Amino acid sequence: MVIKLDFYFLKYYKDKESFGFWKKIGMNVLELKEPEKIDEIIDNLDDRLPKTIILKDELASFSNSIISKYKNTQNLNIIIVPNSNTNDK
C-alpha cells in the first residue's frame, strides 16, 4: 500500500529566508502576496489527498480562526512554526 502525502509550505512573498531549503529540493512552497487570504488559500488546496501545511506564526496570525476552523478537518495537518527572529529572552 502506498500513501501519498502533500506538503505545502506557505510564506509571505517578501520573506526571502523561510523554507528556502524545501523550495530548492522541489517541495510546494507557496508565496502569498495577500496574507489576509490565508483561509481562502488553505480551502482551495486539493482535499482529495492527505496534506500537511507548514507556515510561520506571523502568516497564521492573518487567519480568522486557523486552529478552530481546521482542527477537525480530516486529511489536513497544520503546523505553525515560530519566526526565527523572535527573541525569547
Image (cartoon, rainbow, N blue to C red):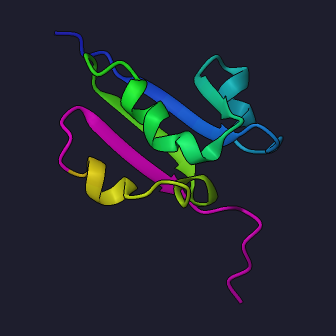
The residue range painted magenta reads 72-89
Q: Position of residue 21 (x, y in %)?
A: 71, 32
Residue occupying the point 83% across, 40% down: 16
Q: Where is residue 76 in the image (x, y as percent from the top left)?
A: 29, 36
* Residue in view at x 48 percent, y 54 percent: 63
Residue 78 image offset from top left, x and y in percent = 39, 46
Farthest bottom residue? 89
Judging depth in this view, the residue of 22 and 44 nearest the camera is 44
Q: Does the magenta stretch include residue 76?
A: yes
17 left or right of 61 in image: right
Residue at point 23%, 31% (across, down)? 75
Q: Nearer the viewer, residue 36 or 26?
A: 36
Position of 50 with respect to 65 (left or right) is left
Q: Is residue 30 above or below residue 83?
A: above
- The magenta stretch spans residue 79: yes
| Image quadrant containing the N terminus | top left
